[in-house]
Amino acid sequence: MKAAKGSMAGQAKPGWASQRPTIIDVANLSGVSKSTVSNVIRDKGHVAETTRARVLEAIDALGYRPNALARDLVRRHANTIGVLVGDLGNTFYAELVKLIELQASEAGYTTIVSNTDGDLALERARVETLLERPVRGVVLLQFSGDRAVLEELQAAHVPVVVVSCADERADCVAVDDSAGMALAVEHLYSVGHRSIAHVTGTLIEDATRAARFNGFKRAMASRRLQPRLLSADWEGERSEAKRELRALVTGGPCLTAFAAANDVMAIRLIDVLEAAGVRVPEDVSVTGFDGIELGAHVRIGLTTVAQPRAELTSQGFELLLDRISGKVGTGQVRRVRLDPELLVRGSTAPPRRDLAEVG
Amino acid sequence: MTLERRATRPALDAAADAATASRRPTINDVAALSGVSKSTVSNVMREPGTVSAATRERVLEAVAKLGYRPNATARNLLLRRTNLIGVVVGDVANAFDSELVKGIERHAAAGNYTTLVCNTGGDPRLEASRIDALLEQRVDGIVLLDFTGDRAVLAQLLAERVPVVMVSCWSEYADCVAVDDLIGIELAVGHLADLGHERIAHVVDPVMEVTTRRARAEAFERALLRTARSPRAEWTVVYDASNAGAAVLSLLGAENGPTGIVAANDHTAIRLMELLERNGLAVPRDISLVGFDGIDIAGLARIGLTTIVQPRETLARKTLELLLARMDSGYDTAPQQHRLIPSLVVRASTAPPR
């Protein structure tokens, strides 16, 4: 590999980065000006065939890659889709990522994934990073709902689709979170629970967290029940939070059921409860949301509200492709609502008789 | 940095202070401060070649002054660093991979790097195309959590002088950090042997990265020999979910079949637990099960998987150390290679044979 001349040697830090070939190296090797090289890459202006061939040869010989920063140079050829994910550690999203990759791959695109951990500042930074890159489109798997983020994407004319959470301002495919929480609450109600808490946490983006909590409140209100909220901050062996949780389910007027905002939280909750000597479902019932594989495990048996993963991703990717191909113009926002499905497993049962009347 | 050292007129300073005092600077602030239109600012950021040098200079000065997108375009135009690290993963749905990625992301963020993740599914073609995509993004370095062993891919990376670190996988040509698979598997086999298991099988994850899979399979044979048990080729089986683990079930159903299983990773062990118990075999009463990796869900009381724990945090930290060192040194120094020692955590999935 030819060590490219450090054209910016005065400013650039020493190291491998300055050894990558630049457009100047291509110009030098092919004996043309920088702007001619640029014209060849952008397929603009008049470049003689022999010159073009020489430039392409030099590009090939040097292994030159157009700088992603000058992204319009490459955007037209980029075949990369950016995927922004809320929590890669939540297998629901990991599984969605894999399905999106499959779709993308079949359509000739490759994917890069960026994890935000449900953090708004990180989300902004990651979107900015993606905007500096040659990407053909962006899939937001979970989205905080931050207006600035969306505006930035739209201002940059990057096709966007929001998958698995709803947003008014962009194409989206999502289940109805309210309807989903209602399924969970109605199921708990139907087996006799009246004292139910919603369990949520910060690893879920704001928009989804709010939508599921609101759905929970609405479902409780329609049954004239008092909604309770519990924050899932018992991680890290905080025995204090665990004691509190135990008190909630064994003290005086106590909770008999938890409707968690997602499966990961529900499964953790079961672990914390059982470690505190509270049995599931004998003492309390727990429901999840999402329908991850682990919830179906024979040892876990989580009653949950499942999202149709395959449909979410296939329809989401279709919307994105329509945008990329220009089939759907700006100013037109499309929303697809899918139905969530209640899966009843072993983590829910009627409340204990001695607790059922309380609340 | 360089931009900030340039002299600016006092009036500019005042305007800049006013703009930055209240909120995050916008493209409008940059346009106002540099006296050009918004679209000119945008052209400078996106297509610098289309703007005259003098205008570009003025806009970049305003960008620097206002701290507009401080870590992105303006600085990169000078340094040609992207502060991006590409992370190549075999299976994001395997919690070991995703937990390690999150650890690497934390350390990367501390060093002011952002990560882009690619998932390969263990497919060499996808691996090559995804790494290509990362290079197109001009990442400053690449971390491979999985590597299919495709020499062409590694050769390309080395040829392009892209700093590469392999974590939890191995190649003699690259910087690596991984646990000692032999020690790990010996711990697993030794534990089952101590409990009295004579007939032990090894179950492999088909998506698992090939060098690690091979290393663990070989380690398994050696560990059996060490405990005076003869390895049998047919007792190393692949758990294939697409045919409902038929190979595993037929092995376990055979006369004098194995009483203990060392799975190549936790991901597989937890699925095996599911498979066995759905087919009427209780863990550990009928079969003892040991995993490898130490993922979080293995520690759930309901799963209670005995496993070989990899020091994830050390792996993540060491990965970033190696990568940053390689970025500084270029390729003039020999590969740095670190083997870490895994440990056995005994939980409820293992017991003496019936």
Image (cartoon, coloured by chain):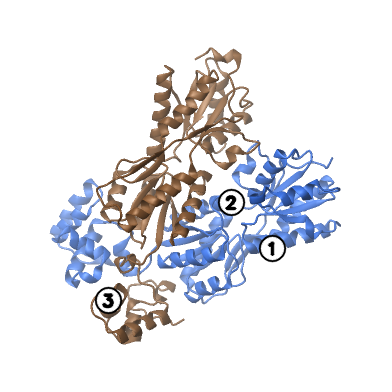
Chain colours: A brown, B blue
- The three-letter amino acid code for the residue at tag 1 is Arg
Q: Where is residue B195 in the image (x, y as percent from the top left)?
A: 82, 45
| Residue holding disc 1 | B214
Q: Which residue is drawn at 46% across and 67% down?
A: B132
Q: Residue at x 29, y 76 (%)?
A: A38
Task: Give the distance between the C-alpha atoms of the residues marked 2 and 1, in whole angstroms.
Answer: 18 Å
The image shows a total of numbered marks equal to 3
Tag 2–tag 1 contact (CB < 8 Å): no
Residue A304: image tag: none
Residue closest to the eye, A42 or A119? A42
Chain for disc number 2: B
Q: In which quarter of the image is residue A60?
A: bottom left
Q: Is residue B43 left or right of residue A265?
A: left
> How many C-alpha atoms fall within 10 Å of the one at disc 1: few (<14), some, or many (≥20)?
some
Same chain under badges 2 and 1? The reply is: yes
| Residue A126 shows up from this direction | no
Residue A39: image tag: 3
Q: Closer to the observer: label 3 or label 1?
A: 3
- The three-letter amino acid code for the residue at tag 2 is Phe
